Image (cartoon, rainbow, N blue to C red):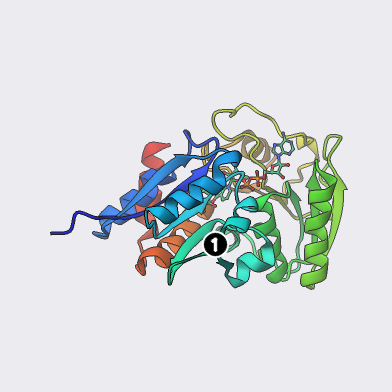
Amino acid sequence: MNFLSKITGSFSTPSAANPTVAMVEAAYKHHGLDFRYLNCEVLPKDLEAAVKGARAMNWVGFNCSLPHKVEVIKFLDGLGESAKLMGAVNCVVLRDGKYIGENTDGKGFLKSLKSIIDPAGKSIAILGAGGAARAIAVELALENASRITVVNRDQNKGKDLVDLINNKTKCKSEFKDWSTKFEVPDHVQILVNATSIGMSPDIDARININPDSFRADLVVADVIVNPPMTNLLKDAKAKGCQIVDGLGMVINQAVLGIKFWTGEDVDPEVMRKKLLEVL
Ligand SMILES: NC(=O)c1ccc[n+]([C@@H]2O[C@H](COP(=O)([O-])OP(=O)(O)OC[C@H]3O[C@@H](n4cnc5c(N)ncnc54)[C@H](O)[C@@H]3O)[C@@H](O)[C@H]2O)c1
Ligand SMILES: O=C(O)C1=C[C@@H](O)[C@@H](O)[C@H](O)C1
């Protein structure tokens, strides 16, 4: 008998409405994996201590969600290729006693988006410049998006992401200040919300954007998982746009993360079913 399960989990704040624990534990159970996934409320001031705690308890890895994806890097022992390029980590993996930061968010998003539209050659506007936005923007640029407009409140963070895309990929990127209501320009074919606006418990929060600027041929994607149908997606649907919710992304990134931690290819449908049950 072995009563020592392998431990994984998620560090974020706010975390109470984050449903990923239900989804990942359903996959572990379905595949008979003796692993646990713990949803942990971790404030920015406690992130270093949380990583030290994980080390002390031999966690085999953990996810970082908002707002830790960039800050966590300084507490890790190294970065995988994609995380190094994006400057953001959502999945930490214990390898040979070292915590290595990986990024599976961008690939998770891309797979979900591609079920609706191929981003190659498209003009894309991304709202936000945090951890999720960095991963999504870089992955879209590597997938040959033609133009990426980064719309962000904080100029420094927004311009930093624009520079990253322009310097490290073939895609053209520009910064758009977000101090007034954003009007989706005519050249934009895909709009992505990579901010946390509309995430539970603030589900009534509205993004500073004019829905009258949504054309019916615009594809609108949201990264928010809970609730899957955000005000942004409701507005987009009402305007006849095709929409992509955050469920596909969160399931796809988890398949990749669980493979890193356990070596197992888990069934995404098990996680989708559980998410739809709990949300
Ligand atoms: N579906 C998924 O798989 C998935 C994966 C990653 C992240 N997410 C979600 O993406 C969201 C962002 O996560 P993150 O890790 O990038 O967080 P973050 O804290 O790194 O970045 C948040 C971004 O949102 C912007 N923002 C927040 N409130 C704003 C407001 N009122 N007005 C304008 N901008 C605002 C910030 O400026 C920043 O650019 C979260 O809701 C997270 O749960 C979902
Ligand atoms: O809480 C979680 O389990 C996660 C949330 C998302 O931010 C993902 O990016 C992250 O990898 C996992």
Q: Quadrant of residue 213?
A: top right
Q: Is residue 180 visible?
A: yes
Give the SS element for disc 1. Answer: loop
Name the foreground residue: 43 vs 197: 43
Name the foreground residue: 11 vs 49: 49
Task: From the top left corner, tell me how far across and down residue 15 is, in percent.
Answer: 50, 37
Which residue sits at x=57%, y=67%?
A: 78
Task: From the top left corner, tell me how far across and down residue 183 is, in percent.
Answer: 84, 41
Q: Is residue 246 visible?
A: no
Name the foreground residue: 24 vs 42: 42
- Residue at label 1? 104
Quick check: 106 above or below 179? below
Quadrant of picture, ligand 1? top right
Q: Viewed as shown, does residue 1 lie left or right of 262?
A: left
Quick check: 202 above or below 240? above
Task: From the top left corner, tell me how far across and down residue 146 is, in percent.
Answer: 79, 67
Q: Quadrant of residue 206?
A: top right
Which residue sits at x=48%, y=59%?
A: 252
Mark 1 CB lies closer than 8 A to ligand 2: yes
Which residue sits at x=58%, y=29%?
A: 203
Q: Residue furthest left?
A: 1
For the C terminus, the quadrant is: top left
For the N terminus, the quadrant is: bottom left
Which residue sits at x=55%, y=45%?
A: 47
Type of amino acid under label 1: Thr
> How many numbered marks have been drawn onto this rendered protein structure?
1
Task: From the top left corner, tell me how far across and down residue 161 is, in percent.
Answer: 77, 57
- Mark 1 Cα shell of 10 Å, populated few (<14), some (14-19), many (≥20): many
Q: Viewed as shown, does residue 261 lie left or right of 195?
A: left
Q: Viewed as shown, does residue 192 lie left or right of 28?
A: right
